[in-house]
């Protein structure tokens, strides 16, 4: 029986084409111990440009989440876009699931390409990884942008009703939807104005292509992210940090942005995007990019080697 046309796979192909067209190429690095990292890297790394690493969240893959900002960023920076473990073409055979391990793998990938200093931008789960990179490799990470990343959350927040879900298991069921009903719940949770009337054939196709691979491993990533979290144990990073948040974020409520801003003090600046939910990269990509660019370009113009 002939395979039906997949709109999801077709869109994935379009993103792949646009990334190549923008000046990136697909690259895979074997870090050893059964860990392989895939990344979109510049076809030509230009030494006169700063380096920016864009780290995706729990959604589809790196291409889908960063597609709208790739072209403008590439004209100004060397841009590296990794797939985190268990997304895209990255995986590990080992048992480690922490964001700290993800951070070490991303840095291993970056170092394999000969990069010594970089700025990191992380959205949602990717923000946890970016923060951990900044904490673990302070001499290499110059600046940090965290987009709707609830790094300041605590394990007790779930019990105290900070989140729309009541347990980590419920969160996993929504974040990795396996039915059209759960996909609808995910869109309601992540968008200020959720898209309506999406044909069920497209929803089922998207789930099949994007949400079935590495399902157990991805759930373990969420469990590791939540377990034992305590703000008092969150390291304080010293790099200049920009926080970008959707005003109506129901995944990581705005309260967590203000909490993180207080934790980081004068090193952090918070920009709140109105009429946007968690998926600011989809709902307000131009506004998100405007804040990113101002923060990163300002650094570039000042030759920003701020002391740690």
Image (tube, rainbow, N blue to C red):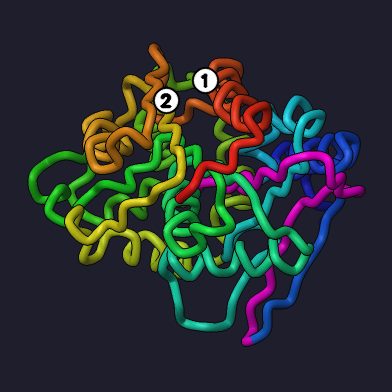
Q: Which class describes the residues within 10 Å of circle 1: few (<14), some (14-19), or many (20+)?
A: many
Quarter of image, res 277: top left
State how many labels appear. Answer: 2
The secondary structure type at the circle numbered 1 is helix
Q: Are marks 1 and 2 in contact (CB under 8 Å)?
A: yes
Vertical relation: 220 (above or below) 41: below
Name the mark on residue 10: none
What whole-number distance in Å separates the C-alpha atoms at marks 1 and 2? 7 Å
- Of residues 24 and 89, the one nearer the viewer is 24
Residue that lies at the very extreme toward the bottom in this rendered image:
33
Earlier-in-chain disc, 1 versus 2:
2
Quarter of image, res 6: top right
Visible residue check, residue 5: no
Q: Residue 99: percent from the left, percent from the top?
A: 43, 63
Q: Would residue 243 appear left or right of 251 to someone viewing this image?
A: right
Q: At x 67% / y 84%, what residue is drawn?
A: 32
Vertical relation: 218 (above or below) 81: below
Q: Which class describes the residues within 10 Å of circle 2: few (<14), some (14-19), or many (20+)?
A: many
Residue bearing mark 1: 283
Q: Which quadrant does the N terminus fall into?
A: bottom right
Name the mark on residue 191: 2
Q: Residue 59: percent from the left, percent from the top?
A: 53, 45
Residue that lies at the very extreme toward the top in this rendered image:
275
The residue segment tinted magenta is: 33-61
Q: Residue 235: percent from the left, percent from the top?
A: 31, 57
Q: At x 66% / y 35%, what residue is drawn?
A: 303
Q: Residue 218: percent from the left, percent from the top?
A: 46, 63
Q: At x 62% / y 44%, what residue is drawn?
A: 54
């Amino acid at each position: 029986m002939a395979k039906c046309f997949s709109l999801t796979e077709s869109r994935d192909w379009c993103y792949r084409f646009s990334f190549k067209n923008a000046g990136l190429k697909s690259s895979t690095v074997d870090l050893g111990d059964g860990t392989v990292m895939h990344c979109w890297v510049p076809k030509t790394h230009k030494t006169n440009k700063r380096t920016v690493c864009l780290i995706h969240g729990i959604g589809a893959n790196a291409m889908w989440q960063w597609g709208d900002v790739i072209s403008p960023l590439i004209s100004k920076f060397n841009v590296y876009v990794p797939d985190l473990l268990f997304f895209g073409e990255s995986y590990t055979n080992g048992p480690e699931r922490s964001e700290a391990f993800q951070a070490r793998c991303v840095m291993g990938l970056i170092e394999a390409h000969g990069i010594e200093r970089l700025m990191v931008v992380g959205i949602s789960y990717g923000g946890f990884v970016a923060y951990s990179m900044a904490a673990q490799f302070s001499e290499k990470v110059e600046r940090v942008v965290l987009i709707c990343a609830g790094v300041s959350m605590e394990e007790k927040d779930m019990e105290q009703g900070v989140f729309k879900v009541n347990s980590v298991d419920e969160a996993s069921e929504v974040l990795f939807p396996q039915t059209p009903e759960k996909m609808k719940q995910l869109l309601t949770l992540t968008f200020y104005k959720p898209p309506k009337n999406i044909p069920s054939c497209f929803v089922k196709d998207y789930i099949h292509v994007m949400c079935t691979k590495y399902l157990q491993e991805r759930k373990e990533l969420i469990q590791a992210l939540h377990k034992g979290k305590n703000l008092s144990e969150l390291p304080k990073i010293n790099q200049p940090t920009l926080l970008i948040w959707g005003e109506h974020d129901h995944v990581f409520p705005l309260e967590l942005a203000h909490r993180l801003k207080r934790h980081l003090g004068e090193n952090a600046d918070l920009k709140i995007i109105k009429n946007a939910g968690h998926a600011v990269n989809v709902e307000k990509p131009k506004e998100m990019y405007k804040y990113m660019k101002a923060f990163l370009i300002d650094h570039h113009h000042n030759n920003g080697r701020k002391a740690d």
